[in-house]
Amino acid sequence: MRQLATILSNRLIATATMEMKIEIPPQTVAPGTFFHVKTSELLRRPLSVANVDGNVVTFLYKVIGSGTSDLAARRKGDVLDVLGPLGNGFPLEQTGKRVVLVGGGIGVPPLYYTRRMLAARGIETIAILGFDTKTSIFYEEAFRELGETMITTVDGSYGEQGFVTGPLARVDADVLFSCGPEPMLKAVAASHIEERYLSIENRMGCGIGACFACVCEAPGGYVKVCSDGPVFRAEEVTL
Amino acid sequence: MRLHVDLPGLQLKNPIMPASGCFGFGEEFAKLYDLSMLGGIMIKAATGESRFGNGTPRVAETAQGMLNAIGLQNPGVEAIIEDKLPFLSTFDTEIIANVAGSTPEEYIHVARELSADPTIKALELNISCPNVKCGGMQFGTDPEMAAELTRLVKAASTKPVYVKLSPNVTSITAMAKAVEAAGADGITMINTLVGMRIDVTTGQPILANRIGGLSGPAIKPVAIRMVYEVAQAVDIPIIGMGGVRTVDDVLEFIYAGASAVAVGTANFENPYVCQEIIEALPGRLDELGIDHILDIRGKAYEQIVSRA
């Protein structure tokens, strides 16, 4: 489960947003799962999987603190200590249904790999991606190649001004897959789409379900984000 | 046999065990390596009833350390005995149960239930958790209260009782002597140091519980000093812990006077850390010219007459 991966590239693709590609031995990586990545800091950092292409796994991460700053300083050829893939991803068995993918900010990346895998199964998808501003946007073209894609920016500098909930209200779909900041997840959890799946983020300790750091309230108790999730049905969690 | 350590109730094939709260009930780590290679396992604290614990965030990183305020989340003693111990009993390793509570009656109940289970070889009396409002550390910072609780739990338990000491006291030796006099079979030390971090964008503590327990490499020197002092003050054995992540950290604790060593936060950084330390121990003992691991126990305070 722990692997030493070689970094193939690590570059800035939008404001404070890095794209890192690593090479790992061949293995199955489900969309919506994550890798727990060792940095210079004590605790690992959970990074969602933005793409998998053969032996190459892509992470997108926002540079926020000391751990992600350390990651941003890594160079091609450096070795990265990763644990994973961990957790449970989005359910891909959606044949015959229409899936809307709703992502916000650094919650967008796992939806790209998910969309690719849904497309490979012939499942129709619509993407709604929300960003703060024009310079924060990434992967727009890559998303457009896979189907209808709507972009919103909070400041209106690109696409539709406002939040993802604007376009979402006009969308006709059977299933919703979402990942993004908690206020956004709360809003999309209350949307009109019948089946809703949310990918939850939380500060993690072990990443494998042992330490109870990343729990999330749930009807009748709690769930562990790292090992029960990070993807849950909207009804399974209390946000 | 050079790693074998005999302690009250515990026949450890090596002196390495994961610390309570950092290893759950072993299920997650059993997927990564064979738990039978461990000297023992200190399982997550049990209380009388199930507890949800504190709000999130429950962890905050610090320089070379981690603050946590989980709040003794656990399914309760009955569920642990029914759902967790059967799995643990399948491994050839010594299981030590961590006993917690809010009242003396709760501690007694939990200790009685757990000690009666054949899977449990010893109890670890948790009087040092800083993250619960009632009980926990409040029993562990007053020598008389700690001694009284030790007496009650000893009377309720059919297995040896190790008392887990809090470092958040003026005199750690006074605490150690008090629990020894009350009948403790051993001491485990140290639990976390109470700390806080504040988010400068909000001006508020990062942890939902506001305060939490500091663990990780940052606290190791404090733990070593405390083990060094307590080992000279009591005659019962010590299981040392606090910031252990390497084989040399283990040797430091044993030089300071510990008979075995627990690994906590390092399991989060590297889930294979206990396995790696155990595998590295014999080679490191060879390099340092040490025959049996306990040959060095307490040598940091015993005068060394000659060194080859």
Image (cartoon, coloured by chain):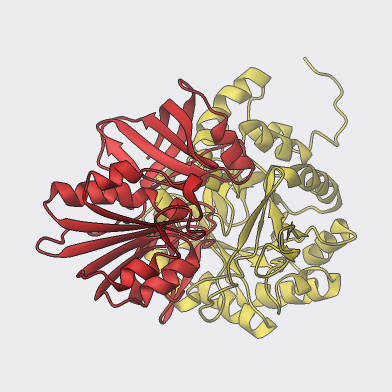
Chain colours: A red, B yellow
User: Residue B217 placed where, x, y %?
Assistant: 69, 42
B297 horizontally vs A72: left or right: right
User: Residue B283 placed where, x, y %?
Assistant: 56, 23
The vertical placement of A182 against B187, above or below, is below
Q: Is the N terminus of chain A in the top left, top right, bottom left or bottom right quadrant? A: top left
The residue lying furthest to the right in this view is: B170
User: Residue B20 placed where, x, y %?
Assistant: 58, 58
Q: Nearer the viewer, residue A103 or B147?
A: A103
Q: Nearer the viewer, residue A68 or A133?
A: A133
Number of marks in picture: 0
Indicate the quadrant where residue B202 lies: bottom right
The vertical placement of B142 against B288, above or below, is below
Q: Would residue B81 be seen by someone viewing this image from the given angle?
A: no
At x 26%, y 34%, the residue is A53
Indicate the quadrant where residue B16 lies: top right
At x 55%, y 42%, the residue is A16
At x 38%, y 69%, the residue is A165
B231 horizontally vs A31: left or right: right
A30 horizontally vs B253: left or right: left
Q: Nearer the viewer, residue A51 or A222?
A: A51
A226 horizontally vs A45: left or right: left
The vertical placement of B95 against B146, above or below, is above
User: Residue B200 placed where, x, y %?
Assistant: 74, 57
Q: Would residue A63 be seen by someone viewing this image from the given angle?
A: yes
